[in-house]
Amino acid sequence: MNRPQLVNQIRNKRSFLCVGLDTDLTKIPKHLRSHPNAIFEFNKAIIDATKAHCVAYKINTAFYEAMGLKGWEAMEKTLHYIPSEHFKIADAKRGDIGNTSSQYARTFFETLPFDAVTVAPYMGEDSVRPFLEYENKFAIVLGLTSNKGANDFELQKTGNEFLYEKVLQTVASWGTPDNLMFVVGATQASELANIRKIIPKHFLLVPGIGFQGGSLKETSEYGMNEEVGLLVNASRAIIYASEHEDYAEEAGSMAEQYQVEMSSYLK
């Protein structure tokens, strides 16, 4: 999926919601856990209930890799079940020397039909470059994250600027808004206006709404650009909205609430 197609989906649905499928077998409703394909059955119902209200799905690969082959198979089945008009993100946070990153890129862009993959930029341009060589695919580079540990490096000064500012400026020069996005945590909303001065045109993947306490209103106010430029992710608040047999219905209701609020912020 290219950027104009993503923008068109956002405009048509009046939503910039990304549903995170961080599916944990120990947290899904008990009546599903004995099912031979429990993870996929759960995800399938969540997708059916939320697809009208969101434009993207983010699969956190760690939750699937932890289960070995069975988890990987559930991830593949989930990925292929997501409708073609939705943007598909592999939240894998890869990043290594060039030849290794080339294999990671091949995994998520060829073997698996994801549209984007999250990437850690610490090892420099050669570790990110392989992800940028695919047409109509995106590297979503970690910029300013929502975890407490962001204070350890990202929010440390290097000269007159924060390290995250240096990362944004440098990485933006490696690609374009057509193949690069950045992760910016919603709990860092106070920095969004500054971030938009550095990267005014790039899409931002924004986690931290919901259980982490990020404000959708502030994220929209300070982070939106002329093409909206936001994919706001909600995971636990949606997929675990209920622990009972009405889990899919409640997930759909929660996704709709996000969509309605997002619609009110769209320019």
Image (spheres, rainbow, N blue to C red):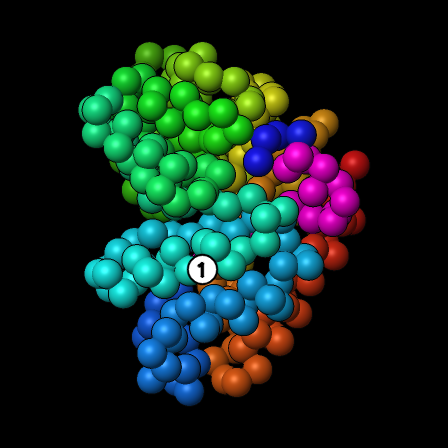
Give the magenta part as a residue range: 5-21
Q: Which residue is drawn at 42% across and 14% down?
A: 174
Q: Is residue 195 visible in the rendered structure shown here?
A: no
Residue 228 higher or lower than 75, as above or below? above
Q: In this orientation, which residue lies closer to the viewer: 129 or 258?
A: 129
Q: Position of residue 246 (x, y in %)?
A: 57, 82
Q: Where is residue 144 in the image (x, y as percent from the top left)?
A: 42, 34
Q: In this orientation, which residue lies closer to the viewer: 161 or 21?
A: 21
Q: In this orientation, which residue lies closer to the viewer: 105 or 197?
A: 105
Q: Where is residue 33 in the image (x, y as percent from the top left)?
A: 35, 81
Q: Which amino acid does label 1 sit on?
A: Thr
130 relative to 165 in the view: left or right: left
92 relative to 86 in the view: left or right: left
Location of residue 6 by image quarter: top right
Location of residue 27 by image quarter: bottom left
Which of the image's four quarters has the N terminus? top right
Q: Name the residue under label 1.
A: 78
Q: In this orientation, which residue lies closer to the viewer: 84 or 194?
A: 84
The residue at the far front in this view is 111
Q: Is residue 12 visible in the rendered structure shown here?
A: yes
158 relative to 216 in the view: left or right: left
